[in-house]
Amino acid sequence: MNLYPAIDLHFGRCVRLQRGDREKETVYFENPIEAARWFVEQGATWLHVVDLNRAFGDREDNRTVIAEIVRAYPDVRVQNGGGIHTLEDMQVMLDIGVERLVLGTVAVRQPELVADALSRFGASKIAVALDAHRGKVATQGWLETHELSTLDFARQMAELGVPIGIYTDIARDGMLTGLDFDGLRELTQNVPMRFIASGGLQSLEDLAQLQQLPADRIDGAILGRALYENQFELKDAIEQFG
């Protein structure tokens, strides 16, 4: 199981939000490189890095910080999402050294662009964000809810050839209330795709329960606030489940 410690970037700082609400922000590291170091020293092989400024449509972005993280830890793979809307955006991030791109709003609004990205960059470079609000897909930094169901959207992306979907129940994100196993179970049973679980993970027990889902459908999990709030240590999670 791949474990993805999360580094969410907002105005150059490492933060965590509650349910995606930028008014409920906690700053954990003024310098995100320190967050990356903290994770890498515990054995991280992946980092999940989100540019919140771009996700919210701000003029500012955190590409410079992301590039610094990639340069500082070249042996660690970076998965990056947040405000990636064009093939040019994708090329820029891949040129920086990002290993995998996470497409969100653009995948809902322009599925044909996802097909183009798969053709141009290869399936291993593309994942989609399955951000769910009461069973519907959320877009635009979770500020809007689409009429498309999360399940139907996942099926659409799987038909295009997207190999990985990152499933987040927005109501749980940053709340330490546990993963949405019902939603994950529905996806694994109905969509031929591998899934990364995200949103609300609170304990090693969540990871143990995640392991009970079909191994060929679960890629791993994103670990956020639980690590920053010292609910458990990344090195222990890697030792038991990585």
Image (spheres, rainbow, N blue to C red):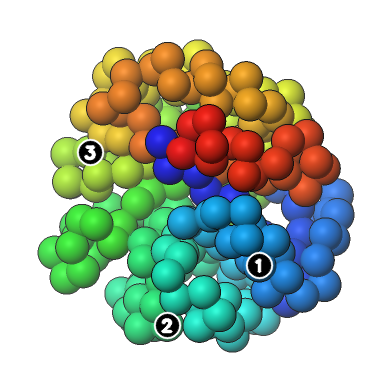
Which percent across, then down, holds residue 217? Answer: 30, 28
From the viewer's perspective, is the residue at label 2 or at label 3 nearer?
2
Q: Nearer the viewer, residue 137 or 223?
A: 223
From the viewer's perspective, is the residue at label 2 or at label 1 nearer?
1
Which percent across, then down, holds residue 54? Answer: 59, 70
Quarter location, residue 95: bottom left
Which percent across, then down, holds residue 188? Answer: 33, 22
Q: Nearer the viewer, residue 107 or 193?
A: 193
From the viewer's perspective, is the residue at label 1 or at label 3 nearer?
1
In this picture, residue 23 sits left or right of residue 12: right
In this picture, residue 173 sits left or right of residue 187: right
Specify the label residue 37 is tagged with. Answer: 1
Quarter location, residue 26: bottom right
Q: Which residue is mark 2?
A: 96
Of the numbered discs 1 and 3, the one sitting upstream in the chain is: 1
Give the residue at x 24% y 57%. 124
| SS at circle 3 | helix
Pointers 1 and 3 in contact (C-beta within 8 Å): no
Q: How many marks?
A: 3
Q: Which residue is mark 3?
A: 158
Does the rendering let one see residue 153?
no
Q: Residues within 10 Å of mark 2 (few under 14, many from 20)?
A: some
Give the residue at x 44% y 76%. 74
Quarter location, residue 165: top left
The amino acid type of the residue labelled 3 equals Ala
The amino acid type of the residue labelled 2 equals Ile
Does the rendering let one see residue 191?
yes
| SS at circle 2 | helix
